[in-house]
């Protein structure tokens, strides 16, 4: 008897974690601190909402649009990325998708058949793993070292005749780590030599702490033969509910992406696309302010962490929207996380949701999504974690 595709994977982690809130009361003087999800909770800025309201009066906003997105948005994003990366991206190399998750799904559909393989560094972004499971594609875990940065040489040893791609996320979800340019360059060289694709998910690139381009891959005039960048407008312009993402690849591959989009959503939602276009044209300075605020919250995590370090916690990674905490307690992270809701009124995801079941590192870590927590909230988060009284692991929690 065949098994439905959805049975091949796990329950969505965010939905699973929300079940821990049932039956727990959060008084006004001790509200829940939700660091489980990397999604802005504030609406788009007022001027963007006004532009969206105006767009609602246009008939075309309510009709089907081109499968690969509004030509104006494709052109604007191509120009933005060409300028940012010092290379050439043309409009016919840009496809607009219903969020970055759909961009990944569409790319996998163009690359993989039943039983093919994709290499994912561990810890991985769980929705990437879920889609590979539901596509009948084997996920090949790539272990990372103490710095949580994947090694192209280690990845080379995992390539088989069924390997179709390596997928990187930088800045990383869940660790926050920003992969060095030379590492990304090394993966591009590996992929090109092996005749496979490098999928580079840059959902959080607008919150990278480094100045200038985080890599130079698009300066190569032949970038589209190997590199497939993905992007999201959700975090940058607070458009999570409007589902607007993008994929950049060859015009030939976009013809295949077009088939996927037409069969799934027909086209990206028009209102969100118009908002994204308006944002690209008008919100450069506003976005710089958003980045500065995220970087200040990252600094608050780093500055405040010594309080927890004295109790055996370790800060393994921090950047963009995320921090990756190693906990010191004598229990697995998937046991600790529900306890944090009850004892500290903190909702965080255990790293077991980002790792293979047989990877022991998942049991030692938590992902902290801090983008929606202001400086006072970060202080309160540390207060509550510092106050925990739980049995410590015999070794102090070292990985």
Image (cartoon, rainbow, N blue to C red):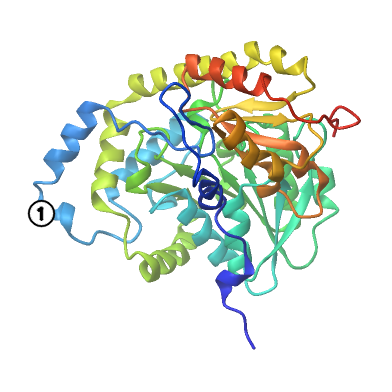
Q: For this view, does 73 lie left or right of residue 384?
A: left
Q: Name the residue under label 1.
A: 59
Give the camera-side residue of 180 and 105. 105
* Residue 86 in view (yes/no): no
Q: Which percent across, then down, holds residue 281?
A: 28, 30
Residue 138, compared with residue 122, is above or below; it is below
In the picture as drawn, the residue positioned furthest to the right comes out as 395
Q: For this view, does 297 lie left or right of residue 180?
A: left
Q: Which percent across, then down, holds residue 144?
A: 79, 40
Indicate the quadrant where residue 236 lies.
Answer: top left
In the picture as drawn, the residue positioned furthest to the bottom comes out as 1
Residue 250, compared with residue 206, is above or below; it is below
Residue 146, compared with residue 247, is above or below; it is above
Residue shown at 24% from the left, 43% from the top = 274
Q: Which percent across, then down, holds residue 216?
A: 60, 32
Residue shown at 49% from the left, 27% from the top = 371
Determine crowd level at label 1: few under 14, some 14-19, many 20+ residues with C-alpha closer than 10 A. few
Tally of marks: 1
Residue shown at 10% from the left, 54% from the top = 59
Residue 371, compared with residue 67, is above or below; it is above
* Residue 199 in view (yes/no): yes
Give the camera-side residue of 283 and 357. 357
Pick the quarter of the image with the C terminus: top right
Give the camera-side residue of 218 and 298. 298
Give the camera-side residue of 189 and 243. 243
Q: What element carries label 1?
A: helix
Pick the quarter of the image with the N terminus: bottom right
Q: Which percent across, then down, holds residue 56?
A: 13, 46
Residue shown at 81% from the left, 54% from the top = 358
Q: For this view, does 162 lie left or right of residue 197?
A: right
């Amino acid at each position: 008897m065949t098994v439905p595709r959805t049975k091949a994977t796990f329950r969505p982690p965010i939905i699973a974690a929300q079940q821990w809130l049932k039956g727990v009361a959060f008084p006004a003087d001790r509200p829940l601190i939700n660091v489980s999800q990397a999604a802005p909770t504030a609406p788009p800025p007022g001027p963007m909402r006004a532009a969206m309201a105006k767009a609602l009066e246009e008939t075309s906003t309510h009709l089907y649009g081109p499968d690969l997105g509004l030509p104006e948005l494709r052109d604007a994003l191509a120009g933005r990325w060409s300028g940012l990366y010092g290379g050439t991206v043309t409009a016919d190399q840009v496809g607009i998708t219903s969020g970055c998750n759909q961009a990944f799904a569409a790319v996998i559909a163009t690359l993989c058949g039943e039983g093919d393989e994709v290499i994912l560094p561990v810890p991985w972004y769980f929705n990437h793993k879920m889609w590979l499971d539901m596509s009948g594609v084997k996920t090949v875990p790539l272990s990372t070292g103490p710095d949580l940065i994947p090694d192209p040489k280690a990845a080379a040893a995992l390539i088989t005749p069924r390997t179709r791609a390596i997928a990187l996320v930088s800045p990383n979800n869940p660790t926050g780590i920003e992969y060095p340019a030379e590492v990304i360059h090394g993966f591009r060289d590996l992929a090109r030599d092996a005749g496979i694709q490098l999928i580079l998910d840059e959902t959080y690139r607008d919150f990278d702490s480094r100045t200038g381009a985080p890599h130079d891959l698009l300066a190569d005039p032949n970038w589209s033969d190997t590199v497939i960048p993905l992007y999201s407008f959700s975090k940058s312009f607070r458009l999570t509910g409007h589902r607007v993402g993008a994929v950049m690849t060859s015009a030939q591959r976009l013809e295949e992406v077009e088939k996927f989009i037409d069969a799934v959503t027909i086209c990206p939602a028009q209102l969100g696309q118009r908002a994204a276009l308006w944002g690209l044209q008008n919100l450069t300075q506003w976005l710089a302010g958003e980045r500065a605020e995220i970087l200040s919250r990252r600094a608050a995590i780093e500055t405040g962490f010594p309080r927890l370090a004295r109790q055996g916690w370790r800060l393994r990674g921090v950047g963009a929207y995320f921090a990756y905490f190693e906990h010191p307690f004598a229990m697995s992270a998937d046991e600790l996380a529900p306890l944090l809701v009850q004892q500290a009124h903190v909702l965080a995801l255990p790293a077991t949701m980002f790792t293979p079941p047989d990877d022991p590192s998942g049991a030692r870590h938590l992902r902290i999504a801090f983008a929606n927590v202001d400086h006072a909230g970060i202080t309160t988060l540390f207060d509550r974690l510092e106050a925990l009284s739980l049995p410590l692991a015999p070794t102090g929690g070292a990985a």
